[in-house]
Amino acid sequence: MKSAEKYVGIHNDRNGGMTEMGKIIRNAWIFGMIPERESCEGWPATGIKKLWRRVDAEWEQYDYMVGNLPDDLRQRFSRIHSEAVERARESGWEEGSELARVA
């Protein structure tokens, strides 16, 4: 996404949102940085980049490992990720096509 472009939103993104941008948004949901109803549709690249920095700083506290998350965040991660995979499958995405890079 170029800096002048606006993001299409996780629900309009390719592969049912199983993209790097989708990963940033899902992780922001997990950490409570944005509400789960926020799709980031129309956000400029700078807004997504700022969100990514916040998400990255949060993951760093847990050594980027789901198993190091507190129980409540680990459960939220599991739920959000499972729901995302289901939505992506319904849109025609096949597990393994990009999941290894975004999970």
Image: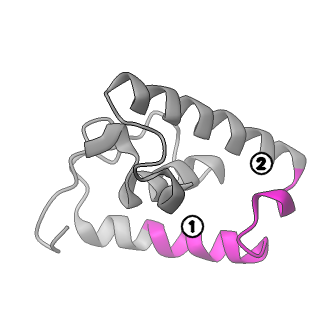
Count every numbered label the image shows and give the total.
2
Rate crowding at label 1 as few (under 14), some (14 to 19) or many (20 or more) other CA atoms within 10 Å.
Answer: many
* Residue at the spot of label 1: 55
**Region rendered in magenta:** 51-70
Using a 10 Å C-alpha cutoff, classify the residue at mark 2 as few (fewer than 14 neighbours), some (14 to 19) or many (20 or more): some
Write the residue at 52% across / 48% down: 26
Q: Amino acid at mark 2?
A: Leu
Q: Position of residue 72 (x, y in %)?
A: 83, 43
Q: Amino acid at mark 1?
A: Val
For the N terminus, give its image quadrant: bottom left
Residue 6 vertical position relative to residue 80 in the rendered view, above or below = below
Predominant SS of the magenta segment: helix
Q: Quadrant of residue 78?
A: top right
The residue positioned 58% from the left and 73% from the top of the image is 56
| Residue sticking out furthest to the top | 90
Residue 57 in the image, given as x and y percentages of width and height: 63, 76
Q: Quadrant of residue 37?
A: top left
**Which element carries disc 1, helix, strand or loop?**
helix
Image point (88%, 46%), residue name: 71
Label 1 or label 2, whichever comes before in sequence order: 1
Q: Is residue 28 magenta?
A: no
Spatial separation of the CA atoms under disc 1 and disc 2: 13 Å
Q: Is residue 55 magenta?
A: yes
What residue is disc 2 on? Answer: 73
The answer to whether residue 9 is left or right of residue 38 is left
User: Please, what secondary structure does the residue beneath circle 2 have?
Assistant: helix
The answer to which of 46 and 77 lies nearer the viewer is 77
Quadrant containing the C terminus is: bottom right
What residue appears at the point 40 percent right and 49 percent down from the top-left corner?
97
Q: Which circle marks residue 100 in the picture?
A: none
Foreground: 89 or 38?
A: 89
| Front position in the image: 19 or 75 | 19
